[in-house]
Amino acid sequence: MTYIWSRNAFLFISAWFLLGGVYAQGTAESRNMALEGYSDLQGRTAYQPTIQKQGNRWIAYIGHHGDKKINPLNGKLEDNGTSIIDVTNPKKPKYLYHIPGEEGLAEQGGSQMVRVCSGANLPKADKNKFYMLRVFGNQAHEVWDVTTPENPTLITTIVKGLKGTHKNFWECDTGIAYLVSGNPQWRTNRMTQVYDLSDPAKPIFIRDFGLVGQQPGAGGAVPTQLHGVMSTGPKGNRVYFGYGTNSEGIIQIIDRDKLLNGPKDPTPENLLYPQVARLDMPAMHGAHTTFPMSHVDVPEFSKNLLGKTRDFIVVTDEAIQKECLEGRQMVWIVDSTNEKKPFGVASWTVPEKSGNYCSRGGRFGTHSSNENMTEVYFKKIMFFSHFNAGVRALDIRDPFSPKEIAYYIPAMNKNTVVLQAPPGAAVANLPYTEASNKKAIQTNNVEVDERGYIYIVDRANTGMHILSLTGNARSIANWEAADK
């Protein structure tokens, strides 16, 4: 008998072994998604990718969790910080520079978060420069000049002496930055410090902000800490805050103008003044990423008198515990058309049985979505990192019924490590099994660029994979909007 081998046949055989309980190192799994390029990121554990077009080049900035690795560019042992990579040719990424971060391991060190703005967009910046906003571990927020990515220079430290940082948001057209911080005077490690960075060299503090109960001098229980922020800028006049990761999640819709120009003393009344709505999630779910999609035409309702155009928030939880020792963290679609009464209308998760994911090792569940609103994908396709289930692409043209259209699970390699137990696991005395000591892909974050490439980075040191859509999934995107 003659066998005709193809890429699909290879993936079928891989899937057959997988369903039999064997997950072989060195085998990638995919559907409607292809690998274009790869960088090992110097074997560093990675968190946030941001991709910026700079002149004729495309540059990827990668934030890292804490650890120490040798930098082959200079031979030095460096604390994980920020990797800078030229991805102009996605098939041949070129590692340009590594900026060391804070000493420490995992969440206690590194430089997880990174945003980049062009001076041509920032109102008061040098129009010929590019600027990078990053955290320095849990201590500080910094601005760097990355006009020449091979030679970045520190411009200023915006604020230091903090007790926590996380996923910032920077409006490049206005310069307003929402810095997730741990002001030592506040009762939580993560709240918001709003700054005007329209001139990145001269930061202007605007205000501190958080949930009632987090402010200095408050009593009672402290609400769950902030995780991330997304803003629609002055045009949309809304800021979306996500609190919590895998428990006690809160989604907060804020009037941007009232936040920036209203009373700023952190009294309960002033903290509530800009709030449009607050949606408390079930106890076992969080709000890692809150991605707004406004003015969505819903095809199913096209003949209805009311409700044919609606607003949504795509909320993504973060899986924390290994081996599914928590509630399933997943994607939730919230209808916010009536902002004062947001409600959930859909959810999505990878079926566990499709890959025996709870026993593969590492975490299984969502972590984050892409945050770039490029017209190539916006309101059509979203991408979600799913730890040991890789990255998943969803058709969200009908937010009431999201459908998976593509996925990619990278192969493990020589750099892949066993993900360490999350904070608090020993205290909770969780019943880990043999799977807790297995190496597994841990796709941590995902981002896209205006060309339509998809970038995923791995928490377990596997590196960065650059992907593209193929097959029927590719036909959904708006390729006329792609920057070629």
Image (spheres, rainbow, N blue to C red):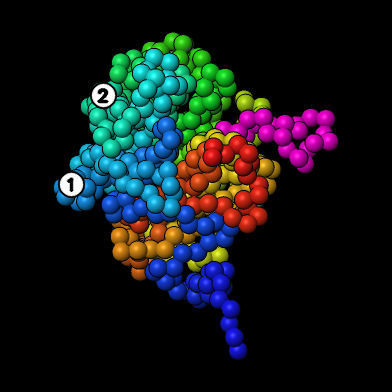
- Say what secondary structure mark 1 lies in: loop
Residue 74 tag number:
1
Q: Position of residue 179 (x, y in %)?
A: 37, 27
- Compared to residue 5, the image places residue 297 above or below, namely above
Q: Where the N terminus falls, by quadrant?
A: bottom right
Magenta-span inclusion, residue 254: no
- Mark 1 Cα within 10 Å, few/some/many (few <14, many 20+)? few
Tell me the residue that label 2 is attached to.
155
Residue 241 tag number:
none
Q: Where the C terminus falls, by quadrant?
A: top right
Q: Position of residue 472 (x, y in %)?
A: 66, 55
- Amino acid at pointer 1: Asn
Magenta-span inclusion, residue 303: yes
Q: Position of residue 415 (x, y in %)?
A: 30, 60
Is 62 displayed left or right of 278 in the figure? left
- Compared to residue 285, the image places residue 410 above or below, namely below
Circles 2 and 1, Cβ within 8 Å, touching? The answer is no
The answer to whether residue 343 of the structure is visible from this angle is: no
Residue depicted at x 63% and y 57%: 471
Residue depicted at x 51% and y 19%: 256
- Amino acid at pointer 2: Ile
In this view of the protein, which residue sits in the foreground, 361 or 440?
440
- Say what secondary structure mark 2 lies in: strand
Residue depicted at x 35% and y 69%: 434
First along the sequence among labels 2 and 1? 1
Name the residue at the front extreme.
56
The answer to whether residue 483 of the structure is visible from this angle is: yes
Q: Which residues are magenta?
A: 291-315
Q: Position of residue 169 (x, y in %)?
A: 43, 29
In this view of the protein, which residue sits in the foreground, 75 or 405?
75
Name the residue at the left extreme.
76
Is 394 displayed left or right of 161 in the figure? right
